[in-house]
Amino acid sequence: LGSLGRRRHFQPDEIIFWEGEDPAICGNVIKGALRLTAVTGEGREQNVGALYPADFIGRPYPGNAAFTVTAMTAGEICLFSRTSFENFLSSNPKMERRLLMQTLATLDSTRRGILTLTRRTAAQKLAGFLIEIAARDETACATAGRCGPVTFDLPFGRRQVADVLGLTIETVSRQLTKLKSAGIIALPGIRTVTIRQKSALQAIAD
Amino acid sequence: LGSLGRRRHFQPDEIIFWEGEDPAICGNVIKGALRLTAVTGEGREQNVGALYPADFIGRPYPGNAAFTVTAMTAGEICLFSRTSFENFLSSNPKMERRLLMQTLATLDSTRRGILTLTRRTAAQKLAGFLIEIAARDETACATAGRCGPVTFDLPFGRRQVADVLGLTIETVSRQLTKLKSAGIIALPGIRTVTIRQKSALQAIAD
DNA sequence: CGACTGCTTGATGTCTCTCAAGGCTAGTGG
DNA sequence: CCACTAGCCTTGAGAGACATCAAGCAGTCG
């Protein structure tokens, strides 16, 4: 698929695209995680989406990037120039269809995310977030037993968790300690989380 | 384009698709406006998007509808069965590309909407909402002078405004009366709004 | 050791929700 | 024509959740 692309590695917090510029390139995530952020008038950041392996990045057609793309973890992307990508799509209608399906799926999950951000309490957001991260981690590692406690690393710090969930770092921290006090999770390391009672966490997430 | 589609008219509050069913049809909006809503665990509704003429509706590939589609106004849609639509796309790669571009644009504006819903106060949300509706109405009618007061009808009631903005009807009502008291808007009718000081409204919206 | 960064914890404030009551309008039936 | 009812909107009082402001703590790097 991507023999005509150029591989590029990235480090955490590296910025791939800036909001407002026209990068004229697009590509696919191969490894790692990136985030899309927009900035409010007051200068606050808000994550509006995340990109994981196989996700599409950039815009295949002219226009300024609507969001800044920043690396959350180390990883790798495969970049194409826009023109070569367009040519590729034109000659591979199947790929174009696949891209369309994927974009529609992303749209659905983005809309679903709106619910999370608007109609949930901080506790619900955080519980849901932990479950989601754990699931993503679990599929990658497949180490954990179904019922036992699951341990994983958050791919980033409190600030970024807060930006994803639309909260402040203080609220994130308080909710985490509350979950810890309740015995639902443990925090063996600063970025390490152990889910001790997944059912309870699920109940909070609703 | 749509000679193979079936026309269907709809009335306000008519439900086109239910969340969770697999409608096996998709189509385009021709006239009117629809909204996509999701329901929280507690039974509260939240608008996650709106559909206007030329927007795509439904899913072109198998899968349950992620959201309920309800008419906001009277209007008309052009519906295709999924299979005929897929065939159409396969034989018209240009249409498929157009649909892809449109979906990407929708994704961008949906992500942009997340900012509005998470990082803005009730006053900011409502001010921005009024400006947006006014602009949409204005382009349709093109009656109003650039600087003078603009009068238009809200396409729906307080409850739906609240659902769009992620607020309660009480908060919407309070913010409206506050704007009225400040002389920024007038409310000649229950669903009619006059913008008296657009610049002030814009300043509040940020 | 001291500066720095990221996390936690506390005190206070404010915005919005919730609950509750009252008003306006429209439609209905006597 | 006038109660009467039903919806929708407004308005108020109170509570709760989260943000903000402000320290304090624990690692890390020079």
Image (tube, coloured by chain):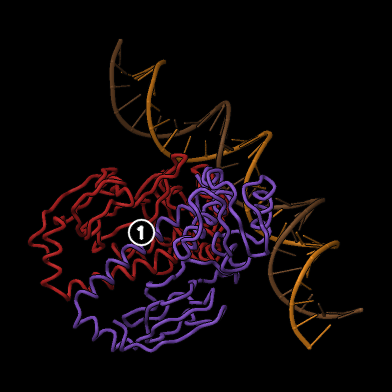
Chain colours: A purple, B red, C brown, D orange
Viewer-proximal residue among B137 and B41: B41
Residue at the image position 51 percent from the left and 62 percent from the top: B201
The quadrant in which residue C28 appears is top left
Q: Is the residue A166 above or below the residue B39 in the image? A: below
Q: Is the residue A7 above or below the residue A163 in the image? A: below
Q: Is the residue B156 above or below the residue B205 in the image? A: above
- Disc 1 residue type? Asp
Count of numbered badges drawn on the protein:
1
Give left or right: position of B49 versus C5. Answer: left
Give left or right: position of B75 versus D12. Answer: left
- Where does the image place residue B141, in percent across and percent down from the top left? 29, 62
Residue B158 appears in the figure: no
Give left or right: position of A165 versus B22. Answer: right
Residue at the image position 45 percent from the left and 84 percent from the top: A21
Determine crowd level at label 1: few under 14, some 14-19, many 20+ residues with C-alpha closer than 10 A.
some
- Where does the image place residue B79, in percent across and percent down from the top left? 16, 55
Viewer-proximal residue among B167 and B155: B167
Viewer-proximal residue among A126 and B93: A126
Instruction: Report the quarter where the C terminus of chain B lies.
Output: bottom right
Residue at the image position 65 percent from the left and 54 percent from the top: A186
Residue A121 appears in the figure: yes
Q: Which residue is mark 1?
A: A108
The quadrant in which residue B120 appears is bottom right
State the residue lying farthest toward the left.
B3
Residue at the image position 58 percent from the left and 64 percent from the top: A154
**Chain under disc 1:** A
The quadrant in which residue B43 appears is top left
Instruction: Report the quarter where the N terminus of chain B lies.
Output: bottom left
Viewer-proximal residue among B97 and B74: B97
The secondary element bearing badge 1 is classed as helix
- Where does the image place residue A99, in percent across and percent down from the top left? 28, 72
